Amino acid sequence: MIGVLGPVVVGDRPVPGVRARRLLVALVLADGRPVSADRLVDEVWGDDSPKSPQAALHTQISRLRPLVRPAVVEAVAGGYRLDADTDLARAERAVREPGDEDSALLLWRGAPGEDLEGDGPAAELARRAAAAFDRLESRVAATALTAGDHAAAQAIAERRIAADPLDEPARVLLMRALAGAGRTAEALAAFADLRRTMITELGTEPGDEATALHHDLLTGSAAAASGRAAAVGLPAEVTPLIGRDAEVAELVRLVTDRRVVTVLGPGGVGKTRIAEAVGDAVARAGTPVFSVPLASVRSADGVLPAVARVLGLSEPDLGADGLPRRAIRDLGSRLLETVGRRRCLIVLDNCEQVVDACAGVVADLVAGAPGVTVLATSRSPLQIRGEWVHPLPVLDTVGAGSAAVELFRERARAVRPDVPLPDAAVADLCRRLDGLPLAIELAAARVRTLSVEEITDRLTRRFALLRSADRTAPDRHRTLHAVIEWSWELLETDAQRTLRRLCRFPDGFDAEAAAAVSGLDPLDLDDALDSLVNQSLLHVTQSGGRTRFRMLETVREFGEERLADAPEQTDGTDESAEVDAAMARWAATVAVAMWREYRSVGGHAVIARLADDIDNLAFVLRVSVDRMTAGDEDAAATVVHVFPVIAGLWSMRSMHGQVREIGVRVIRALPDPRAALDAGMSEEDRELWQATVLASVVAPGSDPKSRHVARGRTMIRRLIRPELRFERPADYFSAFFLQRSVNGMLRLILSGVTSPAVDVRLHALAARMNLRENSGDLAGALEDSVVIAALGRDGDAWFEAMLAMSTGSIYGQRGRWEEAARRYRTAAERLSSIGADEDAKQASAYLVASLCSLGRIAEAVEQQATVAGDWSPSGPDPDGAPEVAASVMIGAAELARLRGEPDASLYRRAGELLVRRIPDGGRDPGSEMLVATALLGVVECGAPEMGADLVAALIAGDESMFGATGYWDLPQAATMALAIGAHLVATDPGCEEAAIMVGLSRRLGARQDYPVMHATVERLAVPPEGASMAAWRAQAERIDGMSRSRAVQLLRETTAALRRRA
């Protein structure tokens, strides 16, 4: 354990060096959260910042790591985090979780922060330690009072008063301890001393609590001696409250500062449990609490009697039915008289079914009784003046350590202690249950007879599955269905209709979507949405300045049930089918509007809106494809309007597998377009048809020889207007797709770059830029990039990212790493802004390579931490696409090699991952380049024997690069030659093929993106030891004089020879 509550120690070992101690304490104070590198520099050095702050910090971290083991200092995005057990965390946990205060107080070994010097972490540590100590000691004192150990309480009070004579809570504690011991006169004297001190020092009288206690002592009230106040109606805790510490603490603070606080949330989110916990905490602090359950109260007239009964109104005032014999107004007056000016908290639990009556009672109470605070729980707010609404969120479901998973484990093991609880399966189940505590508890009860995976499989019928066998549970919580039905019955007809019809949106919706599907006019719809929000059946979120609404999965399923049971419409139609049709119309309208906006102005805004609705549009698309497959030709219009837009965003986010999966089904089911063309298809619809077909057949990974690609080619022939191929982008792309010859494609490119249509010219220039780069004409490719940048739309993040990525690649392979780093940084930022996380990570990985090549190691380390996230070389392979995962590993390997800690196995892991997950790595220039980099790393680390499989993979990629359907990339071919040549030099330096491959890498221009590439080029600039200098130079002169086409031919001949030799 790391100790900071006194001199800083790890276990029983002092931490040497004030900077190391300040760094460790700064990490401890973050409670496991990441701390930025800049913040750590400020905390460790303050105003005396070192010349190279990042390098100095990295040095301190490296020194600290072995000191704190087995704790872990992890590099994370932008900084570091500490994963460790600390005495401060234990102490603060004891503050949140009462029961072991004495042990927690023993954690203090001295004055926290005294060995840190200066301010910074020392001041923050001292503040937090003091706050925890005071809370713990106060609780020990309160427990001592309750147990009758007045001497212990008195000792604590006197110590605190000696430290701070103005500590009024300590003075109150002393008065209670003395009074409890029967020393009332001394307690009264203690008050007199308090009053004298406060008037002298502060010019003010003691507060309400001390004054009220003084009054009770004078009148002989027995309550004066008690540390814990009365808690009427609060049940004893049977099971621990999990994952709600922060909410309980916040609500305790709120009921101290506010007069009316409403805990708002859907049924089953745990409002009652958290109100009970808050009430218990308030009572333990000395304020009386009265908890009033209202779930059984169904009429407005029953609210006031329920409150009065809990607050102790005499029995003659109430009849046998619980209703008042007197008039309601008289009962209200008597209630105010009973409360008077007493300080107390009244908890009103389950207000939603009588919310108006509750609002009236609460308004009267807070107006007529200044000492009363009200904590209400409800699915809808009271909507009175002064109310503070605290929405209670569902439990966090992210990861195996989340609160939702902890709750499931606790409840599952209570019913079956030996049940297997796989982390991933439990986390997935809790996510599917929306993190709703009641649903999690009901699901956990099912482990008596089902595995976690079986419970998850049965969630399609969650209402039948999630029933409680707990005989003590309220009826409204015995089933998940009853929880939702309770709120449903409180809705007006329009609100019920709205819930029913909007339940098929899987990921929220805005008011425009709600209007399109609900069928209500705007004013009625506003009222219906407001009602659903007030009943916590919809949650309100903000996205891009726009309001969106979201249903929990349980509410959506309830809505589906009600939709299936809905009566036939007046026109004889089925409401479920009507909802599907309305959603299809909405999806087509929204998708086409986004298509038009992006085509005209581009920009972040349209991509952000598309991202908000992508799951909804995908749902409609899948339903429409199913209908189209079943022969419904009307569904084709929806597919054609929606699919190109979805495919665009999926492609931006590298979700090519989803595009292919849907695209195959689309092409197979799309009707022949000739009938629609003959009927007078609009130009916009013709473009959308073309975009649908092209998106379906050209996604990366599609097999050009497949049947669905052939069908797509037939459709494009019918849709294209060849005479418009240089005027409309869709026709230009279609012409490209139909073109079979290289010369034909070259003609399309050369004609396209002079097109008057900007979009056509842009795409032609991009094609020429790529062609020039692949041919080794990097200067020409850069010229094209300048023209493309001038023609592009400002604010189009995708366009800017792709251009920056391509340009960065050109600079990187030529060793112009400063320009490359700038482009990669721009690409990563733009890609992140549109949610293209995998591509952003790839750009960041290339940025690491450029920074390493520039020798900016500290920056590279920081960037690598962002890219790697939680991954470390000692763990399993990183998550994500194989190219991205390999880039992360190669970045770590390069940094290790440059630090003088070469790790050939890490390079090999990266290469083997690519070979394993992309069997024909040569189909992708990026993956081929990374395999070559991995092989170069293995060789540079002095372990060429580890690279044999990587050599074989590179040789196998020759056909993919230069075959009939290859991508013909000369810089990549040169890099492949460099890697194979370097391996041959290391294993058989005298062989002819070694000299040939190294010569070809120089003639064709090998890439230098990574430091290991540049290092190899420099090392092999002279003949290696063991080779014939004359033969080596002869080969170099011969190859330098070759044309590039002859050099490629020689490369293919040499790889073929190596393949035969293997």
Image (tube, rainbow, N blue to C red):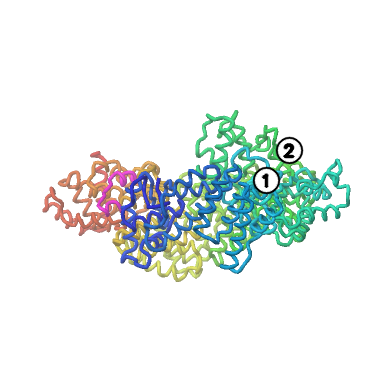
Residue at horizontal 40 percent and vertical 66 percent from the top: 785
Q: Foreground: 610 or 232?
A: 232
Q: Viewer-proximal residue, 290 or 1018?
A: 290
Between discs 1 and 2, the one toward the N terminus: 1
Q: Is residue 982 left or right of residue 412?
A: left
Tell me where residue 805 appears, x and y as whole percent: 41, 60
Residue visible at 54% across and 46% down in the picture = 152
Is 44 inside the magenta-drawn segment?
Answer: no
Question: For this view, does 688 lie left or right of residue 752?
Answer: right
Amino acid at the residue labelled 1: Thr
Task: Measure the C-alpha gap from mark 1 to mark 2.
Answer: 14 Å
Q: Nearer the viewer, mark 1 or mark 2?
A: 1
Q: Which residues are magenta?
A: 895-911
Q: Position of residue 524 (x, y in %)?
A: 77, 58
910 within the magenta span: yes
Which percent across, then down, holds residue 334?
Answer: 82, 53
Residue 444, by quadrant, is top right
Judged left or right of residue 590, residue 856 is left
Horizontal relation, residue 225 to residue 604: left or right: right
Residue under label 2, please give it.
Answer: 475
- Front in this rendered view, residue 802 or 396: 396
Q: Position of residue 448 (x, y in %)?
A: 60, 29
Vertical position of residue 1003 compared to residue 628: above or below = below
> In which quadrant of the rendered image does the C terminus lie?
top left
In the rendered image, the vertical position of residue 1025 relative to residue 684, given as above or below: above
Q: Is residue 965 visible in this depiction of the protein?
A: no
Tag 2, which secondary structure?
Answer: helix
Circle 1 is placed at which residue position?
Answer: 272
